[in-house]
Each structure stands twice: as structure tokens, then as C-alpha cells.
Amino acid sequence: MTDLWVSVAVLGVSVLLSELIRSAARLFPRDYRIYLLEAASTFQLCCCTHELKLLGDSAQLELSYGLALTYTVTLVHLATFQDATCNPTAALESVCRGTRSLRAAGVLIMLQFAAAVAAQSYVASVWSQGLSDIHLRHQSSDFRCFDPLGGTLLEAAVVELACAFVFQAACMHVHKLDARLQVHFIAAVVTAAVYAGGEISGAIFNPVLAFSVQFPCSGHTYLEYCFVYWLGPVLGVVSCILLFEKIIPFLFGGSTAGMDVPAIQKKKTQ
């Protein structure tokens, strides 16, 4: 149980550090503020997921505790991310919808990946302090992680596609719920996705998060990870948008989802 509380403390410090950066971002003009918010929130997402993954891989956490912690951390992310999306697919979608220029989206994506790399260095420095037995064991293995896939490449890619599809669909329709229930609904969807697909692919369904958490692991090539963690989620998002905004309206002669998707939609949190 001590290891659990140490990990909770690490999660809290990561959130507080990111919140300090978000607070400092208020001093900048709005045109630049969004980039700082994106970097800080992506950093927070990756740091917390690194710690949760390490805790989960240790096999010392009961399933109920793990899911409860995933749900709680997701709520914290949704409450603190503000306008940040922390997901390259959201930036690309905004370009397709005409709400952001290609150049702005490119800068946003570069900052997301930079924050993902910074998160790797940050958690390694935290783990090197040996604050818990889990950290000490991970340090003794030189912070290496091993094959994160519990199935074939195709199975893992399908899981990532399905998780991204379900998450996108939930975000496209969450505005129909009472405002007080929206964040809880999204957190429940993320938790359910982690429970359903976690053993096969990790249920990441976010390209930049996968780059930070899964790509450093051994067991597969860079291109194989790209197939699973980049192509899978992108196809999931695209297929979801086509289904609800093109195919269903075409078949039934109406619109089932507006083009202005709530900002909450891309905050892949775990």
C-alpha cells in the first residue's frame, strides 16, 4: 500500500507542476497561451500515464483500485486541461474542419511530442530517487519496459481503433447530457476502454501518449508501434466521424452530430 501512496503523490506533484505552467501561461497573449497550455497538459497526461503504467505492471494493484485510480485521474485531467487537447488527431481534425491553420496545427503537434519526450525524462528522474520499491525495481532494470502487446499486431491495432472510435463517439454526443454528468461520462468511457483493451494494447488510443509511454518498450519495431498506436487511433477517429456526420445523415436524411465538436473530446486521459 505504501507504493500506491507514493505513486499517488507522484501523480499529484505532476499535476501541480503542470498547473503552475498553465497559470504562467495566463501572462502571455491568447495566441501563444494555447501552445503553453497544450505543452503543459500533454506533459501532465504523459507523466501520469507513465506512473499508472508502472504501477499497473507491478501486479501489486488490485483491479478495482486500478480502475478507480484511472477514473479519478481522468477526472483530474478533464478538470485541469482547459482548452488543451493533448492529441494530434484533434489538431488534424481542427484543420479539416477549418478551425485551425495547417501551420498552427503543426506547431501544436510538435509541442505535444516535445512535451511527451520531456515527460520521459521527468519520470526517469523521479524514479531514480527510489521513493518506493516499485521505483527501485524499475531503476535496477535501467527503466526498461518490455513488450506492451498482449496479442498480435493486428489485434492490438483493432483494439486501438475500437477504443478511439468509442471515445470519439462519446465525445461527439456528450453534449446531450447534463453538464454535471459530462466529465463523469467521459471518465467512465476511458476507464471502460482501459479495462476492455488494456491487456491487449494498453488502450492508449492517443498517438502522442503512445509515443511517450509505449514506443520506448522493447519487443517490436518503431514501424510496428506506428501501425498499432498511430494508424489504429487515426482510423478509429476518421471512421467515427464519417459514420456519424456522413453515413448516418445520408441514410436517414438528417444530422446526428454537429460539426462543432466539444473541446472535451480529445482529452485522452488515463
Image (spheres, grey):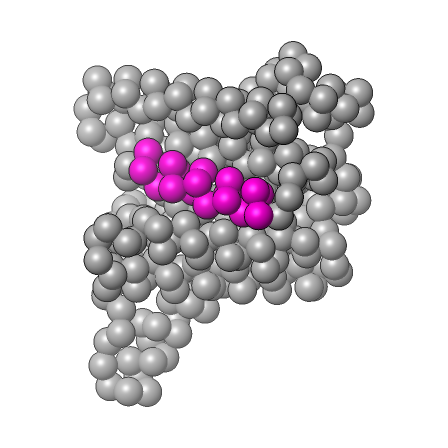
Q: What range of the chain is rendered magenta?
A: 64-80
| Position above or below: 258 against 69 | below
Q: Split into 4 quadrants, where in the image is the N terminus? A: top right
235 shown above or below 52: below
Q: Residue at x 79, y 20 (%)?
A: 140
Q: Picture coordinates of residue 224 (x, y %)? A: 70, 51
Residue 141: horizontal and vertical position, in percent? 80, 25
Q: Nearer the viewer, residue 29 or 50?
A: 50
52 inside magenta stretch: no
Q: Residue at left 61%, top 64%? A: 158
Q: Position of residue 18 (x, y in %)?
A: 39, 23
Give the residue displayed 44% in from the left and 40% down from the top.
72
Residue 216 shows in this picture: yes
Asked whether residue 87 appears in the rendered view, the answer is no
Helix, strand or loop: magenta stretch: helix
Residue that sits furthest to the front in the current view: 1
> Any magenta on residue 72?
yes
